[in-house]
């Protein structure tokens, strides 16, 4: 049962830090910046938001501040992934009670998980909440790769698994999801350099941190594909591609925080072991943002 149908350009804010904790004032500024730019939903606590490096108090603070900042203007998709099922369930319940419209879950694990273990993990989360779950497939960060067959099986058999964010950069996986589900399972592109091909293949939207830095071309690209204006979409993509490749290669928290600072929003440094962007990288990013 789908309760919140996400679509379009889903903006992923950074988590700003100050004095060792979450800077909720700057977080509000970042979210306002994304909403005013025209994104279609806000997704705090993704990879860009450094979820993996937050303690539980910081997680709660970020959830509460993000939902307050959005203030009902857009859907909110909260990342809740944790190493354990109990931890993920706890975070998912907190996000749901705080007012999130959906949660995003990657099966993060030290041990390689079997399909039975992944399925049971998602089923437990679904049983604990009453909002939609986006199954997030990003084996590069989670260590677990969910194939299209498993994702569609979970969609068909687990009540609140209603959407997929596919971040492997493999277009054939998205096409297979569409084929196996008969087009019923919405999938979102989470691989920035693949965005044009993914949208053309029927992706329901684009999960991205890029609108923090260059929102207008990101939104125009989505709109052009939706309108069937592929030449315009191609031109926009060609212009955006160097930035998309740069922020992925340099690490999203590192590059996006540096870019926000260049734009006058002091989002702070990423949390160690991540390091701030070096001077060479900042110079390159400055050129990319200047057009």
Image: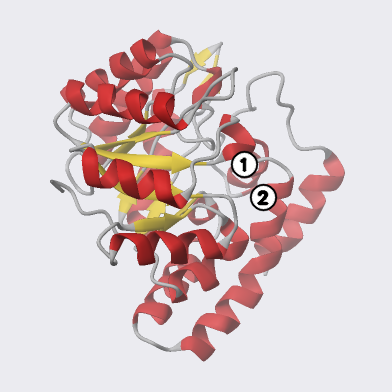
Q: Is residue 251 left or right of residue 94?
A: right
Would you place residue 83 above or below residue 285 in this image? above
Q: Is residue 177 left or right of residue 248?
A: left
Residue 191 percent coordinates (x, y): 56, 55
**Crowd tier of the residue under label 2, counting other residues whose Cα lies within 10 Å: few below 14, some 14–19, many 20 or above:** some
* Image quadrant in which you'd find residue 126: top left
Q: How is the image coloured?
A: secondary structure
Q: Report the Cα–Cα distance between label 2 and label 1.
A: 5 Å
Q: Is residue 30 left or right of residue 282?
A: left
User: How many discs mark residues in the rendered view?
Assistant: 2
Would you place residue 291 above or below residue 270 in this image? below
Task: Name the residue located 45 percent from the left edge and 19 percent from the top edge.
Answer: 82
Q: Is residue 196 visible?
A: yes
Give whichever of discs 2 and 1 has the lower sequence position.
2
The reply to whether discs 2 and 1 touch (Cβ–Cβ < 8 Å) is yes
Question: Which label number is shown at residue 252?
Answer: 1
Quadrant location of the C terminus?
A: bottom right
Question: Which label number is shown at residue 124?
Answer: none
| Front one among 134 and 148 | 148
Residue 189 percent coordinates (x, y): 47, 57
Q: Which residue is mark 2?
A: 247
Q: Secondary structure at mark 1?
A: helix
Task: Name the residue located 41 percent from the left edge and 56 percent from the top edge.
Answer: 188
Q: Is residue 33 visible?
A: no
Task: Name the residue located 53 percent from the left edge and 90 percent from the top edge.
Answer: 231
Residue 102 percent coordinates (x, y): 25, 38
* Image quadrant in which you'd find residue 245: bottom right
Task: Name the residue located 54 percent from the left edge and 54 percent from the top edge.
Answer: 210
Q: Secondary structure at mark 2?
A: helix
Q: Residue furthest right?
A: 280
**Crowd tier of the residue under label 1, counting other residues whose Cα lies within 10 Å: few below 14, some 14–19, many 20 or above:** many
């Amino acid at each position: 049962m789908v309760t919140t149908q996400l679509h379009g350009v889903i903006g992923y804010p950074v988590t700003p830090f100050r004095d060792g904790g979450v800077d909720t004032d700057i977080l509000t500024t970042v979210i306002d910046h994304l909403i005013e730019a025209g994104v279609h939903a806000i997704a705090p606590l993704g990879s860009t938001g450094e979820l993996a490096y937050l303690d539980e108090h910081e997680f709660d603070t970020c959830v509460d501040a993000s939902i307050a900042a959005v203030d009902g203007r857009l859907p909110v998709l909260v990342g809740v992934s944790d190493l354990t099922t109990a931890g993920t369930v706890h975070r998912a319940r907190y996000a749901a009670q705080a007012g999130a419209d959906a949660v995003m879950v990657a099966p993060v694990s030290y041990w390689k998980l079997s399909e039975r273990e992944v399925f049971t993990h998602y089923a437990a989360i679904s049983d604990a909440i009453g909002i939609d779950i986006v199954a997030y497939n990003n084996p590069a960060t989670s260590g677990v790769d969910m194939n299209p067959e498993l994702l569609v099986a979970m969609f068909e058999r687990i009540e609140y698994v209603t959407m997929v964010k596919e971040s492997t950069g493999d277009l054939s996986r998205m096409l297979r999801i569409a084929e196996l589900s008969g087009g019923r399972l919405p999938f979102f592109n989470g691989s920035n350099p693949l965005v044009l091909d993914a949208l053309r293949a029927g992706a329901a939207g684009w999960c991205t941190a890029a609108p923090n830095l260059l929102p207008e071309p990101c939104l125009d690209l989505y709109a052009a594909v939706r309108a069937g204006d592929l030449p315009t979409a191609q031109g926009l993509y060609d212009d955006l591609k160097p930035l998309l490749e740069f922020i992925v290669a340099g690490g999203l928290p590192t590059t996006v925080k540096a870019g926000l600072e260049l734009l006058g929003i002091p989002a702070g440094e990423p949390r160690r072991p991540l390091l701030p962007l070096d001077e060479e990288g900042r110079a390159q990013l400055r050129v990319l943002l200047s057009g």
